Image: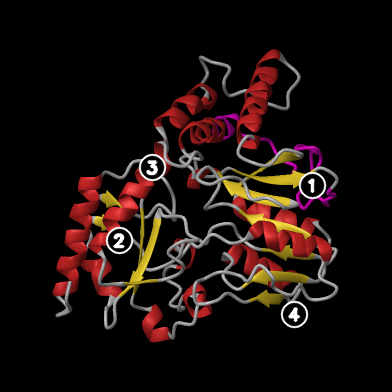
Amino acid sequence: MIYLDYQATTPLAPEAREAMLPWLGGPETDGFANPHSPNRAGRAAAAAIELAREAVAALLPPGGRVIFTSGATEAINLALRGSGARRLAVSAIEHAAVLDTARAIDPDCAVLPVGPDGLVDPDVAIPAGTGLVAVMQVNNEIGTVQPVAQIGARARAAGALMLCDAVQGAGKLAAPEGCDLITVSAHKLYGPKGIGALWVRDGVALAPQMTGGGQEAGLRSGTLSPALIAGFGAAAQLCTRLCTKPGTGDAAHVERLWTRARAGFAGWTLNGSADARWRGNLNVRMDGLDVARVLSDCRGVAISAGSACASGSGRTSHVLRAIGLCDRDAKTALRIGFGRYTGEEELDRAIAAIFAAVRAQGLPA
């Protein structure tokens, strides 16, 4: 299998796996200890968690604290519901975890439009009375990078908090600036599934949404997993070394893959901005293409027609509709995602397989 679905999840880094193993535990070790217990084994587990917290915090702005959660969806719920804001404004291309939660809180939630390039206008008007604005750093379907800092400044001027879903950008790009709340997920940056975090700017008060034990400074009750958090920390530490410096490591590798993929799909239409974009996400379309048939014919290649979280829903992508595509055109789009462990030759083989499937439909490729 050639894996090109990096927006859905990323492979677990070997370094993250190794960091997890001592804390999976067993009867012959004490790595299974409860990190909230006061005994020596518990304190060791707690210390491992704090080391990982520092590593995750290094991916985020200074002047805030990291609260571990079960993933980004829980972090988003804690941020939106815990803020106490009753009037919300969110971008039209937010992940469903933001959109659905925002609408549950505020059925009249304001939707900030995007242009055909998939970007929110940095001078977008924030409706009067808005208590919280949510704009993601990198879109999970089309990869566009939003002007978060400018929108955050407008949110502050309007007296609103700024929430940024940084799931697709954390560990790949510099941390978004001008935010009060930032959500991240380990499995999108080569860590394990089942663990995420909410960054809370100093001075921002939240109401807990899970009570029962007072863990995580009283904001998120429940026994923490040293194994998952250690894996998250190791993945974050690796990203600090490899991902966030332009022209080096992961960034340089992804740039090479992007150039190769763009050349391969030269005759296709790119969805979203070519410049304000995370280049590990190539979302392209071709008139008349039956994407479902391409996915079926390319069983040896893992690609996507959109968000993994909405796959099988039968709904047209709200992101592609938001940039102005009709249902027919939106259903001709493929999302190809690559990253650290993608080889250039296997990318070439995947493109060849996709083109064979396209030609089987009588289309030029």
Q: In the image, is 55 to the left or to the right of 220?
A: left
Mark closest to the chain's N terminus, 3 or 4:
4
Please give the range of residues in magenta.
204-230
Secondary structure type for disc 2:
helix
- The residue that mark 4 highlights is 108
Task: Inspect this view and state whether residue 142 appears.
Answer: yes
Instruction: Classify 214 as above or below 184.
Output: above
Q: Amino acid at mark 4?
A: Asp
Which x, y percent locates residue 10?
A: 42, 46
The residue that mark 1 highlights is 211
The residues tagged by marks 1 and 3 sit, at their Cα atoms, a distance apart of: 44 Å
Sequence order check, earlier mark of 1 and 4: 4
Q: Give residue 191's position: percent from left, percent from top.
A: 49, 39
Query: Residue 236 in the image: x percent, y percent?
Result: 54, 35
Give neighbour class at mark 4: few <14, some 14-19, many 20+ (Cα, 10 Å).
few
Q: Indicate the secondary structure of the residue bearing disc 1.
A: loop
User: Counting residues from the N terminus, which is met first, the one under dot 1 or under dot 3?
Assistant: 1
Where on the picture, by quarter, is residue 237?
A: top right
